[in-house]
Amino acid sequence: VLFMLAGWVSDAIQTDRAHDIWLGYLLFAFFWLYFPLTCGSLLVYDNITEPYLGPRLRPMQQKMNNFIIYIYQTFANAIHIYLVGITFMLLPAGLKRIVAIALGTVYPFVCSVMAVATEEIEDDTYWLTYWSVYGCLFLLMDLFETWMGRIPGFYTVVILTTIYLMLPMFRGADKVFRKILVPLAGLQELLILRDSIQIKKQLLKDLEAERAVVVRKSIAKFFDGDDDDSDPAVLKVEFMRSWSALRILKNKMPFVKSSKGKEPPNEATNLV
């Protein structure tokens, strides 16, 4: 900071006499900063930098560090993907097929075994959905690779599709399962019932029993009455009323815990 200030002042000074005086002050300031007996830099840090500049500069430093790390990771990942892609394109068709199948089976197999060993069923459902969709992809690959297997980019498309289906950040298997496989099988009702069970489990997990009752009744109001009664204005009014009831209940018991001696709610708990 002092160096930049010195450069700005030196450019602004017009006379030689003032320039010599300014250089003398700079010599004294630099000597005062780094000389061990004066410890000027430590005094400046303790009295100016740390209490005044530190709180303002730390968030900026954190953002800059995160941005630099993001740029570095993006650049490194791009180079790795480029090198892996070039290596993959140079492989013969038989090895490309092995790589494509291994990518779609080895990691999901390990995750499926781990999911079966846990008590949660959400991960089981996720990987069962993946295997059902990947089975269709494998059949399509096996069907078309006789004519298209030697076309450059065929197995690359298969790998990219597998990654889209497999990674949780995309949830491609769930989207394909809902939009294509379930309508083809005519199981929309069962899928809706499964989603309603998941909503009930989420209510029991995140909310107290009393609050879960209010939320369940609020949701039920949207499905009561005639199916043709779907005016958005009416639904908005019903929702605002339910939301007001939720806020009143929350204000009355913001720190209420489950009563002792009662069993924790589960999927079979009646929320009425």
Image (cartoon, helix red, strand yellow):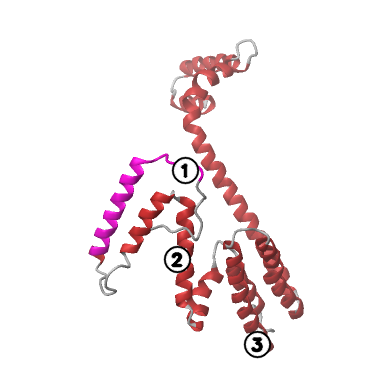
Q: Is residue 203 left or right of residue 117?
A: left
Mark 2 → mark 3, Cα distance in angstroms: 37 Å
Neighbor class of circle 3 (other Cα within 10 Å; few <14, some 14-19, many 20+) is: few
Residue occupying image coordinates x 64% and y 83%: 139
Q: Which residue is mark 2?
A: 196
Residue nearest the observer in this picture, 147 or 131: 131
Q: Main secondary structure of the magenta part?
A: helix
Give the residue type that dot 1 points to. Answer: Ser
Q: Which residue is mark 1?
A: 259
Give the residue type that dot 2 points to. Answer: Ser
Give the residue type that dot 3 points to. Answer: Leu
Kindly state the secondary structure of the residue where label 2 is placed: helix
Kindly state the secondary structure of the residue where label 1 is placed: loop
Residue 107 marker? none
Which portion, as a residue range, is magenta?
234-261
Q: Residue 132: horizontal and vertical position, in percent?
A: 60, 76
Q: Is residue 166 left or right of residue 211?
A: right
Q: In the rendered view, would you say 271 is above or below 140?
A: above
Q: Which residue is mark 3?
A: 143
